[in-house]
Image (cartoon, rainbow, N blue to C red):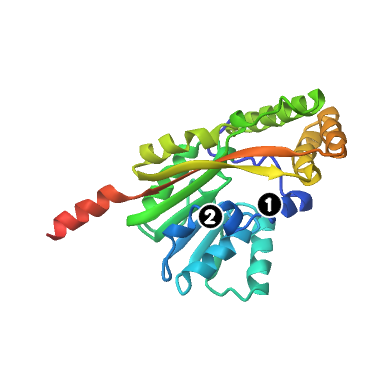
Amino acid sequence: MNPTTENYTPGHTPSATAFLAARDLDSHGFFLAPLLQPGFDVLDAGCGPGTITTGIAEMVFPGRVTAVDLSAVQLETGRRLAQGREIMNLDFVAASACEMPFADHSFDVVFSHALLEHLPAPERAMTEFYRVTRPGGFIGLCCPDWGAVETAELPRKAGLAIRAFRDLQERNGGNTRAGAQLPQWLTRAGFTPLACDGWTEDYEEASAFAEYLALPLEMAGQASHALALREWAREPGARFRLAWRYVTGVRADEARFHRHGAE
């Protein structure tokens, strides 16, 4: 696997985009909100359809938010959403989080949700996040931890299909335990940790979640696993709980250095 190659396992199909678009700042970026202030410049790396990004833009206005994604489909979806909500302080940029076209110290806050688990070299993205964060600026990261997901209560075939999805993502260069590794990635990049915690997302209606996993399995030639997920989702009471982990931090060392230097 080429460490510069990014392969987003769920794909950018309409159903995958609709699944992601159900997320917003309150539901999936709540841990970032205390770090946001009006006038802050914010980077959202791996913005997807922009439903979290627009909430950030509203909180930091008149500061600007820059949303980065490799997918033209996701960026266009985000642009339409921002235009529809008349959000004017939001820019969309096609770029890799591992090599961003921004100057050093460009942002007060760097945010990334559900991105690092898909990257073959997440440390490269973390290096970039540190580079573009201003001294004294903040970072907020969030990823799922599939290793903390309980599948024992699922039908056997559905459990095997979820394992197959994890294997597919790992073969694509991803890391399905990324959530558990966020604290060490944060500190290795040079940030000082502020908070580390998690929550469980409960999909009481399993159909959209099942399709999110089933379609990439089907496209990878694993139709039996895709079928198992879809059949499970049609069962009465089918539900799934996904474990999320988040960390926040501050670029504190250089901020201290600059203050001492000024003195």
Q: Which residue is mark 2?
A: 30
Residue 124 seen in the figure:
yes
Q: Position of residue 89 (x, y in %)?
A: 52, 72
Q: Where 136 sits versus 144, above or below?
A: below
Rendered residue at 26%/54% (across/down): 255
| Apparent side of residue 175 relative to residue 241 in the rendered image (left or right) | left
**For the residue carrying disc 2, how many other residues have a C-alpha within 10 Å: few (<14), some (14-19), or many (20+)?**
few
Q: Quadrant of the C terminus?
A: bottom left
Q: What crowding class fits label 1: few (fewer than 14 Cα within 10 Å), some (14-19), or many (20 or more)?
A: many
For badge 1, the amino acid type reads: Leu
Residue 121, horizontal then vertical, whole percent: 50, 36
- Left or right position of 158 against 69: right
The image quadrant where one finds the N terminus is: top right
Labels 2 and 1 touching (C-beta < 8 A): no
State the residue at coordinates (72%, 24%). Answer: 152
Q: Is residue 50 visible?
A: no
Of labels 2 and 1, the one closer to you: 2
Q: CA distance from mark 2 to mark 1?
A: 16 Å
